[in-house]
Amino acid sequence: MKKLISKIGFLMGGLLALGGGLSAQTNIVGSSVRVYTEPGAGARFMVDGVTYYASQTFTWPAGSKHVIEFPLKSKLDGSLESYQESLDKQSQFAFSGWQDSNGTPYTSSAIVILADPSLKWIRTQAAPAYRVTVRFSSFPKTTSCDPAAPIPQDALRTGFVIVGGTCFGSDSETFMAAGTTQLRAIAFPGSVFVGWSVNGSTSTVASRSIVLNGPVTIAAQFTQSKRVQFLTEPSALNVLVDRSLTPTSDRFVLADDRPGIGNPTCQSNLNLPPNPPLTVPVPSELPRRSTPEPAKCMSSTSSATAKATTRSLSPEPTSGCERF
């Protein structure tokens, strides 16, 4: 009987010990933490030495320590830039610090956090910027972005462009923040802007906007212009040249009739590309100028009727004038 009681007591003790062990394991508390960047595309981060490119959720034991890092670009002297560079060097992501779900900010790019059930997420704002490549040709750099400034005479210069508020006069590369970017092309006298090529997509509008959501190559296309003077009968009418209202001259005017100047060119109403055709409609009931001022080409005050005409300019870009 005593042996039976002893065995029962031994079994009961074992069960109690086993139950205690199960209880201890059941009471282990885990922490589920999401780590990510905003916006989410392109930027990378590291957790405990492993690199990730998209949002990740980790389950850690409460109280465990973990290293989270937003790797920044290193300078030649070993210090760090304030941004991360993509592996293909086409994108940059500005670092603005970490923040967790409890509202705690972290200014360092590498932080150590303590897993806690109250901690739900850790994120960083990584504002993207993309490589912008501006292409012209082999022309030298333009030193001024003022169309009224003197043009350097050391080489042929056709014009310059303004991309996102920055002036470019030769082949260049830079980084610009994602979003809407304004493009503007300004041709120097004697040249004309003929179009943009943006990642192979073309446009002839000199001032336009693009949405920058990745690396982009922007090519500005200029050519030598053909000087054109528009004359109408009766004179001094406004005409539409490729849908742009254009005042005409009262008479054929030479731009420079000083003695010794050979083959003077005309005073032009427009500088136009030499090869493409022009559509020149003359609307009815357009007013005529009351006072002839051919140099200023003011608006007009009488009327005439004419039909639209389409013709091609001669291919020589600067020889003489075209008269319509």
Image: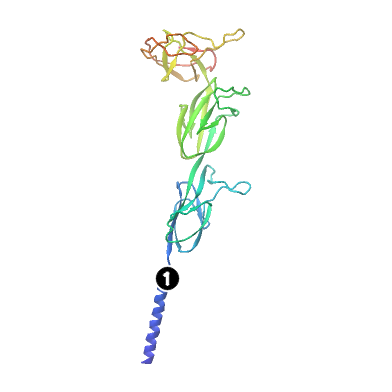
User: For the residue labelled by badge 1, is the local secondary structure a helix, a strand or a loop?
Assistant: helix
Residue occupied by mark 1: 25
Task: Tell which of 180 and 273 is nearer to you.
Answer: 180
Task: Determine the image quadrant of residue 147.
Answer: top right
- Tell whether 156 sits left or right of 211: right
Residue 284 in picture, x, y percent from top left: 36, 13
The structure residue drawn at horizontal position 49% and vertical position 63%, both measured from the top left corner, is: 64
Residue 11, image x, y percentages: 39, 83
Quadrant in which residue 2 is drawn: bottom left
Residue 263 placed where, x, y %?
Answer: 57, 10
- Pick the quarter of the image with the N terminus: bottom left
In percent of width and height, residue 269 lies at 48, 15
Residue at left offset 40%, top offset 82%:
13
Tag 1: amino acid: Gln
Q: Residues within 10 Å of mark 1 (few under 14, many from 20)?
A: few
The residue under the point 56% across, 34% down is: 172
Rendered image coloring scheme:
rainbow
Q: Quadrant of the C terminus?
A: top left
